Structures are given as C-alpha cells and as structure tokens.
Image (cartoon, rainbow, N blue to C red):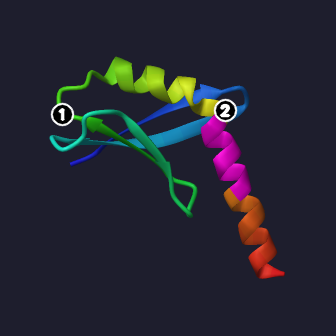
Amino acid sequence: MSQTDCIDFGDTRIDYSIRRTSRRKTVAITVSPDKSVTVAVPKGTRRTIVTKKVQQKAEWIVRQQEQIGRASCRERV
C-alpha cells in the first residue's frame, strides 16, 4: 500500500506517492513517463525524512517532468 503527499516548489505543486519496502536501504525518487513521482523508501522511514528529501530534489523533479513533456510533444509532431 502506498501513501501520497505533495510539496510546493515555487508555483509548482509536486504530488508524489511513497512506496515503503524492506528491500530498500536508501531513498530513491523516480519520475515516470506519465510525469508521476514515486519515492521508494526503506520501511520505518519517517514521513518528515521523505518530505525533506523530495524538497531537496524538487528542482531535479520539475526539470525531469519538463523534459518528459518536451519529449512527448516532439513525438506527436
């Protein structure tokens, strides 16, 4: 079962889902082709730690989402 949360980065809202797993040792952030964001974390990781990591990587997340948007526009042409 995954949880969802969001942060604001400037004028952009970043929605993300949190996937907890016993197999992870570190936090991993993935931006999918549909621009959705998934944060995979070790079980027991506090939500405040997850939020802090997403805030630290917010610029990278937005940049990845923009690149995906540009790539999908080129595919339609």
Q: Position of residue 62 (x, y in %)?
A: 66, 41
Magenta span: 60-67
Binning the other alpha carbons within 10 Å of mark 1 as few (below 14), some (14 to 19) or many (20 upward) gives: few
Residue 30 lies left or right of residue 9; in this view the side is left
Q: Position of residue 36 (x, y in %)?
A: 51, 53
Say whether disc 1 or disc 2 marks the residue closer to the N-terminus. 1
> What is the distance, in whole Å, between disc 1 and disc 2 at their CAs?
26 Å
Circle 2: residue type: Glu
Q: Residue at x 65, y 28 (%)?
A: 9
Circle 1: residue type: Lys
- Outermost residue, right direction? 77
Camera-side residue of 18 and 21: 21
Q: Which corner quadrant of the image does residue 10 belong to?
A: top right
**SS for tag 1?**
loop
- Outermost residue, bottom direction? 77
Q: Which corner quadrant of the image does residue 41 belong to?
A: top left
Binning the other alpha carbons within 10 Å of mark 2 as few (below 14), some (14 to 19) or many (20 upward) gives: few
Q: What mark, if any, has residue 43 been given in the picture?
A: 1
Q: Looking at the image, do the residues carrying marks 1 and 2 touch, with CB atoms under 8 Å apart? A: no
Camera-side residue of 18 and 11: 18
Main SS category, magenta section: helix
Q: Position of residue 61 (x, y in %)?
A: 60, 41
Q: Residue at x 49, y 29 (%)?
A: 54
Q: Which corner quadrant of the image does residue 22 belong to?
A: top left
Residue 57 lies left or right of residue 49; in this view the side is right
**Is residue 61 covered in magenta?**
yes
Camera-side residue of 42 and 55: 42
**Is residue 69 covered in magenta?**
no
Q: What mark, if any, has residue 59 been given in the picture?
A: 2
**Image height check: is 74 above or below 65?**
below
Q: Residue at x 72, y 51 (%)?
A: 66
